[in-house]
Amino acid sequence: MNPHIRDEIVTRLADYPRAVEVGIGNRPDVADELAATGVAVTATDIRPRTVPEGVEFRLDDVTDPVVDVYESADVIYAQNLPPELHRPALSVAEECDSVFVFTTLGGDQPSVPVRRETIPGETLFWARE
């Protein structure tokens, strides 16, 4: 990930004490930097993934979530979230009373109502604040 984009995202999420990243995949940069700032970070994915030290990993599918993974999160976030996961992730955030913010894949548009925030090189979609 571009370090400038990573830093912009981290700056916006670092004030939340507990964060859950949906679908970390092979992009642990944001989770790693958030953990370094003192945020308690849990990363999820549908496949086992290696995450940086200081980041907890939980195997989970946001379309059929284990709610206790998310329930104490102040913010739930995702990078490059495909449109078919926007609504399930938002539902989890609503159920857990968490903020929900995400980025999409290239030209994908959000499939849920959002507030758009343009940061250098990326757009953040705030679906629940």
Image (spheres, helix red, strand yellow):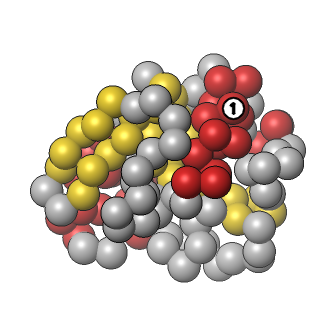
* Image-quadrant location for residue 115: top left
Residue 61 coordinates in the image, percent (x, y): 79, 57
Residue drawn at (24%, 39%), measured in percent from left and top? Answer: 117
Residue drawn at (63%, 40%), measured in percent from left and top? Answer: 87
Give above or below for 101 relative to 44: above
Residue drawn at (65%, 24%), measured in percent from left and top? Answer: 94
Instruction: Quickly name the residue at label 1.
Output: 91
Residue 10 coordinates in the image, percent (x, y): 32, 50
In this rendering, the count of numbered labels is: 1
Query: In the rendered image, which quarter contains the C terminus?
Result: top left
Residue furthest out toward the left: 120
* Image-quadrant location for residue 30: bottom left
Residue drawn at (45%, 45%), measured in percent from left and top? Answer: 110
The local secondary structure at tag 1 comes to helix
User: Amino acid type of disc 1?
Assistant: Ser
Residue 5 coordinates in the image, percent (x, y): 24, 62
Left or right: residue 51 versus residue 113 is right
Give above or below for 53 relative to 20: below
